[in-house]
Image: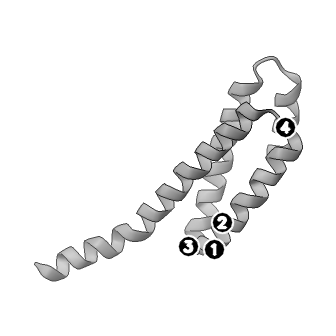
């Protein structure tokens, strides 16, 4: 599904916007899968594969920079998600 969307995005003039939308979709998909898996290692592997696919699809520097930014945000979000329950738990224990 996402592949077809990437292909259509390549042909259109509004490529960048569509790419952003696709990235958002990909992030949501990845988030769903990681919520099930909850392992950062698998997350990293998935991210590298995603970037590889993106590189294959479009070699433009702009999209690559955007992808890297997305990955950074993703990683931060996952780290926060991972640490939040533990922090809350510690807080409740202290009280």
Camera sees residue 23: yes
Residue at horizontal 64 percent and vertical 46 percent from the top: 68
Crowdedness near tag 4: few (<14), some (14–19) or many (≥20) residues, C-alpha within 10 Å: few
Quarter of the picture holding the C terminus: bottom left
Kindly check if marks 3 and 1 are in contact, taking CB atoms under 8 A apart as contact. Answer: no
Between disc 1 and disc 4, whose residue precedes? 1
Q: Is residue 48 left or right of residue 94?
A: right
Whole-angstrom CA distance, mark 1 to mark 4, is 26 Å
In this rendering, does residue 1 appear at all? no
Disc sitting over residue 41 in the figure: 1
Q: Are marks 4 and 3 in contact (CB under 8 Å)?
A: no
Which numbered circle lies on residue 44?
2
* Mark 1 and mark 2: Cα distance apart in space: 5 Å
Residue 39 picture location, percent across and down: 58, 75
Q: Nearer the viewer, mark 4 or mark 3?
A: 4
C-alpha gap between disc 2 and disc 4: 21 Å
Q: Quadrant of residue 70?
A: top right
First-in-chain label (3 vs 2): 3
Q: Nearer the viewer, mark 3 or mark 1?
A: 1
Q: Secondary structure at mark 1?
A: helix
Q: What whole-number distance in Å separates the C-alpha atoms at marks 3 and 1?
A: 9 Å
Q: Residue furthest top?
A: 13
Closest to the camera, between mark 2 and mark 4, is 4
Which residue was labeled with disc 3? 38
Residue 59 image label: 4
Of circles 3 and 2, the one toward us is 2
Tell which of 59 and 78 is nearer to you.
Answer: 59
**Nearer-the-camera pick, 60 or 13:** 60
């Amino acid at each position: 599904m996402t592949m077809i969307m990437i292909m259509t995005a390549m042909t259109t003039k509004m490529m960048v916007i569509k790419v952003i939308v696709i990235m958002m979709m990909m992030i949501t998909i990845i988030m769903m899968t990681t919520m099930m898996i909850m392992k950062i290692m698998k997350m990293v592997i998935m991210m590298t594969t995603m970037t590889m696919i993106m590189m294959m699809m479009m070699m433009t520097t702009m999209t690559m920079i955007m992808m890297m930014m997305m990955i950074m945000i993703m990683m931060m979000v996952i780290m926060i998600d991972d640490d939040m329950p533990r922090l809350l738990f510690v807080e409740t224990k202290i009280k």
